[in-house]
Amino acid sequence: MANTIISVKDLVKKYGDFEAVKGISFEVREGEIFGLLGPNGAGKSTTLEIIETLRQKTSGKVIVNGIDLDQHPESIKKIIGVQLQTSGYYPGLRLSELIELFGGLYNQPVEPLKLLDLVNLRDKARSKFKELSGGQKQRFSIATTLINKPNIIFLDEPTTGLDPQARRNLWDLVTDIRSKGTTVIITTHYMDEAEVLCDRVAIIDSGKIIAMDTPDALIDQLVSTGFERPKEVKQANLEDVFIHMTGHALREEA
């Protein structure tokens, strides 16, 4: 079994009398894609922001790659990559300039073209961020998480608003990043995405983890209760039809 790279024990976050995270515990294994799922307001973003050192916890224990969050938060920052929202970039800078800027912030030597190759954006190196399509912006945001060669990256709803081709292209990108040894923590509201990408998922609701296992195991557990879908399950869905007819290849907006 793979080593534990993130350990969260009895994590609590309070805002006054409101308890957003209610003593949750879970572990993430090295080299897996781990999904944290839940409705809006469930506490998943707060949980991730604590692990990312962006928000202070009320109590509990967080260990990241053997580093205690309470003792060495700056050391944790050096080994993780956090996806920024697209609004966090200077829209008038070229992609190569943005990568060099972030490289300077991380005090890391960077090769912009090599990094852009990883996300299929070499031809956009001289384009300004504001000129990119939605899918291109998301791929670039993932590229920036890799600048400091992190052990772990955090992706917050990376495919929201993307068309089917761009969404599946991003799935391939995430899988490829994991294949190179990087652990991926992802949040998504798309359950089909979690089912395809994630080795394991934790479902959080009202500040508590209510289920955690592989997607297949969770589905089997539900089926074992006698659950049946109200309509016949087909071998494909409408997105499969769309992709089959229009092609899997990524298309960029004109």
Image: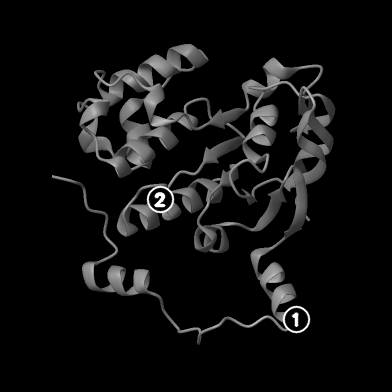
Which residue position is annotated with label 2?
Answer: 170
Q: Residues within 10 Å of mark 2 (few under 14, many from 20)?
A: many
Where is residue 140 shown, x and y percent of the image? 36, 35
* 51 or 178, nearer to the observer: 51
Residue lying at the far left in this picture: please name it: 254
Q: Is residue 158 above or below residue 222?
A: above
Q: Amino acid at mark 1?
A: Ser
> Looking at the picture, how far across and down is residue 222, in whole percent?
71, 74
Q: In this picture, is 78 found above or below 227? A: above
Q: Residues within 10 Å of mark 1 (few under 14, many from 20)?
A: few
Left or right for 210, reference 192: right
Q: Residue 85 occupies which quadrant of the picture? A: top left
Q: Residue at x 81, y 42 (%)?
A: 24
What's the distance in space between the residues labelled 1 and 2, CA to CA? 33 Å
Residue lying furthest bottom:
232
Horizontal relation, residue 231 to residue 39: left or right: left
Report the residue at 60% width, 57% height from top: 198
Residue 180: x and y, percent?
54, 46
Residue in front for this viewpoint, 253 or 161:
161
Name the disc covering residue 224, or none. Answer: 1
The picture places residue 228, in percent across and down from the top left corner, at 63, 83
- The disc placed on residue 237 is none
Tell me if residue 88 can be seen: yes
Type of amino acid under label 2: Leu
Q: Is residue 99 above or below residue 8?
A: above
Q: Earlier in the sequence, mark 1 or mark 2?
A: 2
Question: Dots 1 and 2: beta carbons under 8 Å?
Answer: no
Quarter of the rendering containing residue 144? top left
Label 2 element class: helix
